[in-house]
Image (cartoon, helix red, strand yellow):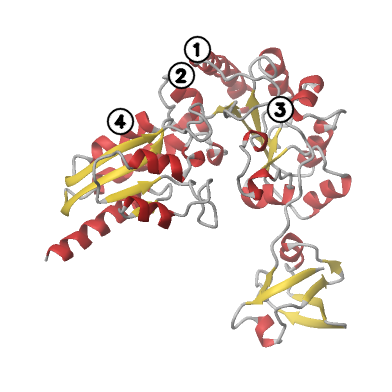
């Protein structure tokens, strides 16, 4: 049973006078517990919806197109909590005093399907596995880390074997596609353990379609946590060479490269970003695997359409984290600065909140950005990187973009990964400046 929070105007539900606050009990006698149940059981031309209003239960008979939604807006799904104690879990590396949601560990296969969240499957029960298969919740994104029992238990902080490979076998045998990741921890799941993990996972291809390997990230807040260390640049380079050997063998065996290193390996080791052939279908770009290559390719395609000049002079500060700085400057900023009347200064921000070893833009706080901006030369416009704010418009330290803008006194925009949008912002602000002058 799930609460109806709103009704779409001019919908079937509005015509039937279904009301906000009603409770949806079932569709065609199938219980509805969340939005996925709702979407799955709607796929019929004729449905019977059982709805509770107060003490009354009402059956609504509906004829519709198979893919037509009657127009119910349902309450948000509550995330299922994670019971693991992963030794590298970022939640444990947050300082005290942040908003409560940042201390919640999720382990929800439904959000893995909907939004690409990574889950370990340690707590999946047989009924969950059956639901995934029955409702075709594919693809899913799985944090494997290791298939070797002892190291997996250590990494995930669990006490007994969670039958990972049995679960993978059941899902892939029933047509569910899995994209997997390994957070690589020096001395724990590299070496022979990594080799075993890759060998085990490739046996499930094409059910397992990709394996992403990402390096360990550690903040300065690790008191009382298991001692871990990050990779050196030399170790990152060695991992590139090692996985290239795996990839050649896998390509011959499977027809695809199968394993993919995140962009951090290449940037931090000083190696060039690979060409697009490295990434096959860019299966895990949201995991930082091929994001820079896609951005560079997009810019190269878009570059011939850049304007020769802006209508009015504009000085722009482009904020980024330290990881992206060199690639952005060489591949994008320098070509953009060839546009007449446009001057873009790239401003890398060191993450003092979490510690300088955290170099991704999505973990920058507004406070660190402000402290870096306040000492920079005046600008007409500030561009902020994607993912620095959440769906509620908040930075990690609870500032809003508007608060940052007021303190700096300069218009601030968070652009998306779409570089066209970024250029649209610059051109729009330039036109406004021209109108003010006129």
Q: Earlier in the sequence, mark 2 or mark 4?
A: 2
Q: Dot 2 corresponds to which residue?
A: 269
Q: Earlier in the sequence, mark 1 or mark 4?
A: 1
Give the numbered dot on residue 87: 3
Q: Is residue 52 above or below residue 198?
A: below
Which of the pair 421/165 is nearer the observer? 421
- In the image, is 59 to the left or to the right of 332? right
Q: Nearer the viewer, mark 4 or mark 3?
A: 3
Mark 1 and mark 4: span between their CA atoms? 23 Å
Q: Classify the position of the C terminus by image quarter.
A: bottom left
Q: Secondary structure at mark 2?
A: helix
Quadrant for residue 89, please give it. Answer: top right
Q: Earlier in the sequence, mark 4 or mark 3?
A: 3
Q: Secondary structure at mark 3?
A: loop
Q: Residue at image x 30%, y 53%?
A: 410
Quadrant for residue 158, please give it. Answer: top right
Mark 2 and mark 3: span between their CA atoms? 25 Å
For mark 2, does the 10 Å Cα neighbourhood hold few (<14), some (14 to 19), or many (20 or more) residues?
Answer: some
Quadrant for residue 146, please give it. Answer: top right
Q: Secondary structure at mark 4?
A: helix
Mark 4 and mark 3: span between their CA atoms? 36 Å
Let me know if residue 188 appears in the view: yes
**Residue farthest along the left direction in this orientation:** 438
Q: Earlier in the sequence, mark 1 or mark 2?
A: 1
Which of the pair 103/198 is nearer the observer? 103
Residue 192 rendering spot, x and y as whole percentages: 70, 13
Mark 2 and mark 4: span between their CA atoms? 17 Å
Q: Dot 4 corresponds to which residue?
A: 330
Q: Earlier in the sequence, mark 2 or mark 3?
A: 3
Look at the numbered discs 1 and 2 and tell me whether their residues touch, using CB distance below 8 Å: yes
Residue 204 rendering spot, x and y as whole percentages: 73, 31
Q: Dot 1 corresponds to which residue?
A: 234
């Amino acid at each position: 049973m799930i609460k109806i929070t709103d009704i779409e105007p001019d919908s079937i539900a509005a015509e039937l006078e279904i009301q906000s606050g009603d409770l949806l009990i079932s569709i065609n006698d199938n219980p509805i517990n969340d939005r996925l149940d709702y979407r799955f059981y709607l796929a019929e031309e004729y449905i019977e919806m059982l709805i509770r209003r107060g003490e009354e239960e009402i059956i609504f008979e509906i004829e519709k197109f198979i893919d037509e939604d009657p127009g119910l807006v349902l309450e948000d799904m509550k995330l299922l909590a994670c019971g693991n104690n992963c030794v590298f879990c970022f939640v444990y590396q947050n300082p005290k005093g942040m908003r409560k949601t940042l201390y919640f560990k999720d382990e929800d296969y439904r959000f893995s399907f909907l939004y690409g969240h990574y889950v370990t499957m340690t707590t999946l029960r047989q009924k969950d596995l059956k639901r995934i298969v029955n409702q075709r919740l594919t693809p899913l994104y799985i944090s494997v880390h290791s298939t070797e029992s002892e190291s997996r238990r250590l990494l995930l902080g669990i006490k007994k074997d969670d039958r990972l490979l049995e679960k993978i076998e059941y899902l892939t045998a029933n047509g569910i596609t899995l994209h997997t990741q390994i957070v690589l921890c020096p001395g724990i799941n590299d070496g022979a353990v990594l080799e075993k993990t890759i060998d085990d996972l490739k046996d499930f291809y094409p059910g397992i379609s990709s394996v992403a390997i990402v390096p360990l990230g550690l903040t300065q807040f690790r008191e009382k946590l298991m001692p871990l260390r990050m990779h050196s640049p030399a170790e990152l380079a060695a991992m590139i060479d090692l996985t290239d050997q795996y990839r050649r063998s896998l390509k011959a065996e499977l027809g695809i490269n199968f394993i993919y290193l995140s962009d951090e390996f290449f940037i931090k080791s000083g190696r060039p970003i690979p060409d697009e052939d490295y990434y096959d279908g860019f299966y895990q770009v949201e995991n930082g695997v091929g994001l820079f290559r896609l951005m560079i390719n997009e810019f190269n395609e878009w570059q011939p359409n850049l304007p020769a000049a802006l209508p009015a002079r504009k000085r722009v500060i482009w904020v980024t984290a330290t990881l992206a700085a060199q690639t952005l400057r060489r591949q994008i900023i320098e070509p953009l600065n060839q546009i007449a009347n446009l001057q873009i200064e790239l401003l890398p921000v060191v993450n003092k909140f979490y510690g300088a070893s955290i170099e991704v833009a999505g973990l920058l706080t507004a406070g660190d950005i402000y402290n870096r901006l306040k000492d920079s030369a005046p600008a007409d416009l500030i561009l902020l990187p994607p993912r620095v704010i959440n769906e509620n418009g908040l930075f990690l330290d609870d500032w809003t973009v508007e608060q940052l803008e007021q303190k700096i006194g300069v218009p601030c925009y968070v652009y998306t990964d779409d570089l066209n949008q970024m250029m649209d912002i610059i051109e729009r602000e330039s036109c406004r400046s021209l109108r003010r002058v006129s």
